[in-house]
Amino acid sequence: MNPKISSPQRSWKLPAAHMSIVPDEWYRDDRYVPQAVEHDQFAIRSRFKRRRTLVRSDQEVARTFSGLASRWRSETLFLSNLDAIILNSAYQQIIGLGPQVIPCILDELLESGSNHWFWALAMIVGEDKAAGTTTMEDARLAWLAWGAEEGFIDG
């Protein structure tokens, strides 16, 4: 019997070749947290997340950001395609630093006025605080005002 995956929009069957059953001993190992999707009488366990807590100091985040931002600038200096600029691996790693990097990005916006940080900020925060603005300068000011209001930078 082939399990079905249902979503509000679609329902489809998994091909038998993609049904990987994970040995039970993996579940006894506390380092892994399985994400099980149950269908009918089957439990397909396809993803495991390694449980880890990563704590970085603000100084370490600032150093990491500085290095990644320098690399990103040098790798995208002559690019005009916005997709290529924001999909650069260094830029994506900056986004991956999470909310702790917001003050660094806002400082960069404040000092250099670079406008390519809007995408990273929106991805980290979860919403575009500059929505509805009509110019890049207005968007920059909206993000800086939000950062000051939230205490990420001095207003």
Image: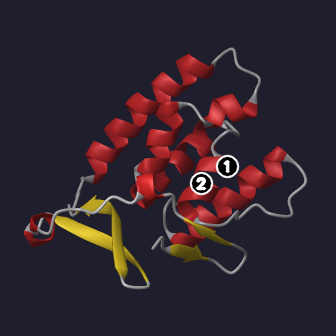
Q: Quarter holding the C terminus?
A: bottom right
User: 74 left or right of 21?
Assistant: right
| Label 1: which secondary element | helix
In the displayed structure, 120 sits above or below 15; it is: above
Residue at the far bottom in the pictured view: 40
Frontmost residue, 30 versus 12: 12
Q: Position of residue 153 (x, y in %)?
A: 51, 59
Q: Position of residue 56 (x, y in %)?
A: 24, 53
Give the labeled residue for mark 2.
121
Give the labeled residue for mark 1.
118
Q: Residue at x 56, y 64 (%)?
A: 125
User: 56 left or right of 122?
Assistant: left
Q: Position of residue 26 (x, y in %)?
A: 14, 64
Residue at the far top in the pictured view: 78
Name the kind of residue labelled 1 in the image: Phe
Labels 1 and 2 touching (C-beta < 8 A):
yes
Dot 1, crowdedness within 10 Å: few (<14), some or many (≥20)?
many
